[in-house]
Image (spheres, helix red, strand yellow):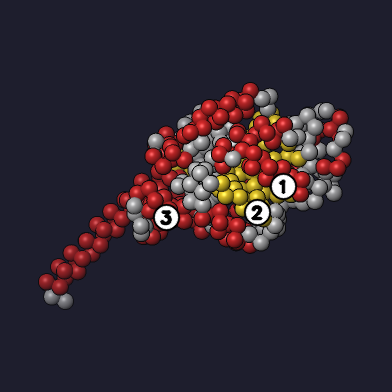
Amino acid sequence: MSKNKKNIVVDLTAALAVAAGIFTGMAWPFFRFITYAGKREEKASPSNRKKWFLLKHTQINHPRHGYEEEYLAARKWCEEQDMQDLYINSRDGLRLHAFYLPADNPKRIILLSHGYRGTCFGSMGHMAKFLHEKDSDLLFIDQRCCGKSEGEYITFGAKEKYDILDWVELLNKQNDRNSYDDRNEYDDGNENNKSNSGKLPIYLYGQSMGAAAVLLASEYELPDEVHGLIADCGFHSMKQQLRDIASGWFHLHWIELLLIRVDMFCRIFAGFRMKETDTTEALKKNVKPVLFFHGVEDTYVWPRNSALNYELCKAPKELVMIPDARHLCSSYVSPELYKEKLLEMFERYDEN
């Protein structure tokens, strides 16, 4: 090889190395921004949460944008309740926390799974009082990296789905109310609301990423006591969600090469692959009834996500699209319709 050709090869190699370095360098801060919470222990605070909620599209899609009074009132009600702290250890060694709120005369148990970088008393709180007044025990889980739960990386449902399964296992083991308190009157007047095993029916109610985690968990064999799922503004996959955010928020319409690098960092540092957050196979295997909600004006998780999830679902299902509602605002925009659909689900499936 001539000297000139060797120089050209060297120059090309160097250029490719620089390009690869820049490419990788661009993916690294993006990966850190979307997945890293920097929270291993209870007193640590997520490093990127404040920055995320300062973004325009995050702000206008939050229930506080337009419904702050109702949002704060709901959260205040939750904070004033006398709840029990529950803990489990995740499959990858994290200590996870939840609050348990028993009803006086329970007919069902509802697990509440909040969204990305959220809080258990945030947007989940808006329906909590109504559900509790309708004789529902409530389990408010802190997703990994949030509240009192440990964690460093948010995995968009890839690991959160296993956390859901473990919370369900705990609920099912202690389902006979006396495991939570010593009130022996638990059985009075509730025989018609128990499943064939003598336990209360359980529902998994998730919002946004919490909805995706619930849907992903449905791929596995859930106990018979789980009678249904409720998914409000759940996304279809992490990859599609990042594509939508890139194009809708930042006008970046082709980020496939960036996503390849992000997926690599997800595998190396956070221990999951983006394909593990895709709801396709889970919904094909799911046998539990699903009630889907989505706001038509949602620009955080686009409505087509729930439309696709609904289409993929092979179990009994219903999709409720709420006009004029942004992300997680359906219960604020149309509270009566939202409540009506919840009660219809309970009436239909509590005794199944």
Gap in Å between the C-alphas at discs 3 and 2?
A: 26 Å
Residue 175 in sight in this render: no
Q: Earlier in the sequence, mark 3 or mark 1?
A: 3
Residue 63 in sight in this render: yes
User: x and y percent of residue 101 in the render?
Assistant: 70, 31
Secondary structure of the residue carrying numbered label 3: helix
Q: Do the residues bearing badges 2 and 1 touch, measured as CB atoms within 8 Å?
A: yes
Disc 2 crowd rating (10 Å Cα; few below 14, some 14-19, many 20+) is: some
User: x and y percent of residue 322 in the render?
Assistant: 56, 46
Look at 22% across and 61% down and name the residue there.
15
Disc 1 crowd rating (10 Å Cα; few below 14, some 14-19, many 20+) is: many
- Residue of label 1: 345
Q: Earlier in the sequence, mark 3 or mark 2?
A: 3
Q: Nearer the viewer, mark 3 or mark 1?
A: 1
User: x and y percent of residue 192 in the render?
Assistant: 86, 42
- Which label number is shown at residue 243? 3
Q: Which amino acid type is marked by label 2?
A: Glu
Residue 112 in the image: above or below residue 290: above
Disc 3 crowd rating (10 Å Cα; few below 14, some 14-19, many 20+) is: some
- Residue of label 2: 318
Q: How many marks?
A: 3
Secondary structure of the residue carrying numbered label 1: helix
User: x and y percent of residue 110 in the render?
Assistant: 69, 40
